[in-house]
Image (cartoon, grey):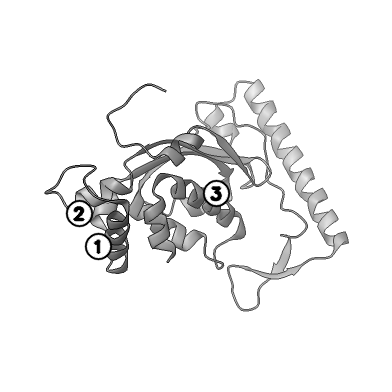
Amino acid sequence: MSETQRPVSPGAEEILGKYFPVLDHGFVALVDYMGTDQCIERAARVSYGYGTRKASLTRGLLRYLRRHLHTTPSEMVELKFHACMPMFVARQWIRHRAASVNEYSGRYSLMPMLFHTPSAEQLQTQSKKNNQGRSGARVGDALYTEAVERWNEIRSRRASAYEWMTSNEVARELARIDLPLSTYTQWYWKIDLHNLLHFLKLRVDSHAQWEIQEYGRVMAGMLKRVAPLSYEAWID
């Protein structure tokens, strides 16, 4: 590794650029980061130099900032992820607008024919208390088997139509329009620490859709590597 003058987090360096699987075909990778816990302290105390404080004092200040909702210093740390997820997860994810996003383009490139299939444990009945969620009670094996068969039939027809149109030089931007929400997409997603914590607070919560919780849990583990003291303060 070449020498650098920038603040470095040893834990983050160990996983930088490594891809971690999520769901059946998805992944998350931490591809870059800017700043560490010490950078948050420096932003909060702009009158002193880097490296002059003990770790225990940094920890105490970060906990104070988090406890009293002084969030601006945490905006000095940024994380950049490369993530691949089903489109229905991406549509929830993109609601968090305080980020820079560049998504795979189906206008320029052929869409990969990868589709998410829920596991038997996750195919559950509709909740009677929560109109936008599942009940926790899985459907029977016979219903699950038929659901998968129907999904596979739909996807096979959609994939066949897409591949037929693109092979006959139909514009990719039109050939893609009937692909299902289970189709995988991917993007680069860069966000500051303050807004990432807000994202995780909502998306790792038990009320969030399970599939996006899975991404949130992996990203929380990566955040713990980049800024462990900030992560600890947020959890507490």
Mark 3 and mark 2 lie on one chain; the one further toward the N terminus is 2
Residue 196 in the image, given as x and y percentages of width and height: 39, 52
Please state which of residues 214 and 224 is positioned toward the viewer in this rendering.
Answer: 224
Task: Identify the residue under disc 3.
Answer: 218
| Vertical arrangement, residue 8 with respect to residue 52, above or below | above
Task: Identify the residue under disc 1.
Answer: 70
Residue depicted at 54% across the width and 49% down the height: 218
Please state which of residues 201 and 39 is positioned toward the viewer in this rendering.
Answer: 39
* Dot 3 and dot 2 residues touching (CB under 8 Å): no
Mark 2 and mark 1 lie on one chain; the one further toward the N terminus is 2
The C terminus appears in which quarter of the rendering?
bottom left
Residue 103 appears in the picture as rendered: no
Per the image, label 1 sits on a secondary structure element best described as: loop
Q: Which amino acid does the dot numbered 3 rest on?
A: Val
Residue depicted at 57% across the width and 36% down the height: 19
* Dot 3 and dot 1 residues touching (CB under 8 Å): no
